Image (cartoon, grey):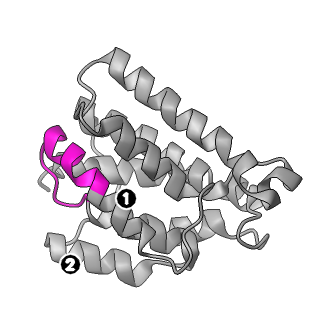
């Protein structure tokens, strides 16, 4: 079996990291409804990332068909834009459009959700391109962690429960594994 392209490996690694935390994400899920399903919805929605399709178009369609709940629709819209990326500079160019597509995936996009994380990511990459060294990676990671922590104060439901947004936290898990994998040529992803 031929090795997966680097972007596909990175998406798979991101999925695996997120899936490992799905139960905890369900437990802290309070927005937009405390229905304990964000982790499960993301695990279902992003499952197509574990097994790349025969084409970019097919992979995007697989994600759209699997998208479940607000978090799944937002994440699938964002990640669908990244499928097919081959180089870090190309990825940096796609992220603002991916963020915009994610915003359009829900009727009433709210700050304090995973959309805030995507805004921070797009802002951190804008103008500087893909992080080229460990110092830049560390700075970007800190910005994303700060954005996730800030979600608690952005939505009354999160502040009352004393938790961060489950979707934003999920995307930070996914992002760390994805970026490490995409930039470091990892070992093959389990399929």
Q: Is residue 190 visible?
A: no
Q: How many marks?
A: 2
Foreground residue among 191 and 176: 176
User: Does residue 15 appear to the left or right of 149 in the view shown?
Assistant: left
Residue at 79%, 70% (x, y): give it: 34
Q: Is residue 91 magenta?
A: yes
Magenta segment boundaries in residue numbering: 82-96
Q: Is residue 150 magenta?
A: no
Residue at 24%, 72% (x, y): give it: 59
| Disc ID at residue 160 | none
Quarter of image, res 139? top left
Q: Earlier in the sequence, mark 1 or mark 2?
A: 2
Residue at 37%, 41% (x, y): give it: 123
Residue at the spot of label 1: 99
* Residue 2: percent from left, percent from top: 11, 53
* Residue 92: percent from left, percent from top: 23, 43
Where disc 2 sits, the SS reads: helix
User: Does residue 82 appear to the left or right of 47 in the view shown?
Assistant: left
Quarter of image, res 31? bottom right
Query: In the rendered image, which quarter contains the C terminus?
Result: bottom left
Query: In the rendered image, which quarter contains the N terminus?
Result: bottom left
* Residue 32: percent from left, percent from top: 71, 71
Main secondary structure of the magenta stretch: helix
Q: Is residue 167 visible?
A: yes
Q: Dot 1, how many residues are within 10 Å of its Cα: few (below 14), some (14-19), or many (20+)?
A: many
* Residue 7: percent from left, percent from top: 22, 50
| Disc ID at residue 58 | 2
User: Does residue 83 appear to the left or right of 24 in the view shown?
Assistant: left
User: Does residue 55 appear to the left or right of 163 in the view shown?
Assistant: left
Foreground residue among 120 and 179: 120
């Amino acid at each position: 079996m031929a090795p997966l392209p680097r972007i596909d490996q990175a998406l798979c690694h991101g999925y695996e990291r997120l899936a490992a935390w799905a139960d905890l994400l369900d437990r802290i899920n309070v927005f937009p409804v405390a229905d304990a399903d964000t982790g499960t919805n993301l695990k279902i929605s992003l499952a197509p990332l574990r097994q790349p399709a025969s084409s970019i178009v097919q992979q995007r369609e697989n994600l759209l068909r699997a998208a479940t709940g607000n978090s799944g629709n937002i994440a699938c819209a964002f990640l669908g834009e990244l499928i097919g990326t081959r180089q870090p500079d190309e990825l940096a160019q796609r992220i603002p459009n991916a963020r915009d597509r994610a915003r359009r995936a829900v009727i009433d996009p709210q700050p304090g959700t995973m959309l805030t994380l995507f805004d921070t990511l797009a802002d951190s990459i804008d103008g500087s391109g893909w992080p080229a060294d460990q110092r830049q990676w560390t700075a970007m990671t800190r910005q994303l962690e700060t954005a996730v922590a800030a979600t608690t104060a952005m939505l009354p439901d999160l502040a009352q429960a004393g938790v961060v947004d489950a979707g934003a936290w999920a995307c930070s898990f996914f992002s760390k594994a994805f970026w490490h994998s995409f930039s470091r040529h990892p070992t093959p992803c389990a399929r």
